[in-house]
Amino acid sequence: MRRNALRYHLSKPVLWTYTPTAVDVYEAERFSGIVYHCVDDLAAYPGVDAEHFLARETELVAIADVCIASSRPLLEHLHRLGARKAIYWPNPADVAQFLPLVRRNRPLTDRPQIGFVGAIQEHKVDTQLVVDMAKLRPDWDFVLVGPVGFGLQQSGLHKVHWPVNVHLPGMVSHQELPDVLQNFDVGLIPYRINNYTSSVFPMKVFEYLAAGLAVVSTPLPSIVGEVEHVEFADSAATMITALDRVLSADLNSDRARFARVEYASGHSWESRCDEALALLDELAKQRRL
């Protein structure tokens, strides 16, 4: 932080943090304000000392000028901790990166590709749900793109007996993501519903929509009633029914795809940066009063 303050000639910058442990480095004489951007309930993450983490978070919320939540459940969490000002900003997407995909006419193939992008961790991804869906539709390909078990001290995912139509190509770079999504027919979010995921707002939601993809997800509290153009299902059978529905001609048409893109465009990084700059300007004005 000191290095960046010197590099950019910052005098008493605002400390914008995504982790409660930043409370340990905050000094009022060094910073003009503090923003806590809460994108996860980290105290619910496997292996974390929840009691200690929540105590640090409570301290941070008490001194933060503004708290930002990436989901409604996290917003409620911040209010319970006593946030003075808490606002809701769902995770945005790099919409412009995916726009070229929408203009490519990719007809539905005989083997639809149902795709997921993200960290494949057992506390997040319902692997049994994916296995059951793959068994119900052996003529479909289920592609889970991302690191397997990343960030966990122990992972049993290597022992999962995946059907032959489930593919795990591994991690890809952000630059490669459009090439990956152009091969998908549907964007899948097969998350478990637990203490951790109940407050997670997957960044991939608006990425899928920005690429024109229909989205099928388990009923995550963060996106049910919050995000349009998403079908929800809570079992392998109902997931397949939802997938059949979004693969239909009407929901796979150019009109439907452009409607999803237009909706996702309201949640771009550009618009989020404008909001962030406006927030910093507001904090600066408050300090001058």
Image (tube, rainbow, N blue to C red):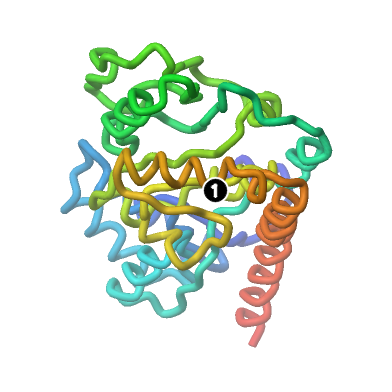
Q: In what element is the residue under mark 1?
A: helix
- Farthest residue to the bottom: give it: 289
Left-right relation of 19 to 212: left
Image x and y of residue 150, in percent? 37, 24
Q: Residue at x 50, y 41 (%)?
A: 244
Q: Residue at x 70, y 72 (%)?
A: 281
Left-right relation of 39 to 104: left
How many residues crowd around disc 1 within 10 Å: few (fewer than 14), some, or many (20 or more)? many
Q: Residue at x 44, y 69 (%)?
A: 64
Image x and y of residue 191, in percent? 35, 42
Which quadrant would residue 248 be assigned to in this image? top right
Q: Nearer the viewer, residue 67 or 251?
A: 251
Q: Quadrant of the C terminus?
A: bottom right
Left-right relation of 138 to 230: left
Q: Nearer the viewer, residue 53 or 105?
A: 105
Which quadrant would residue 156 be assigned to in this image? top left
The residue beneath circle 1 is: 205
Q: How many numbered tags mark residues here?
A: 1
Vertical placement of residue 287 versus 140, above or below: below
Image x and y of residue 1, in percent? 56, 45
Q: Nearer the viewer, residue 98 or 68?
A: 98
Image x and y of residue 13, in percent? 62, 60
Q: Nearer the viewer, residue 127 or 14?
A: 127
Q: Residue at x 56, y 46 (%)?
A: 246
Q: Name the amino acid type tagged 1.
A: Val
Residue 186 in view of the camera: yes
Residue 27 in view of the camera: no
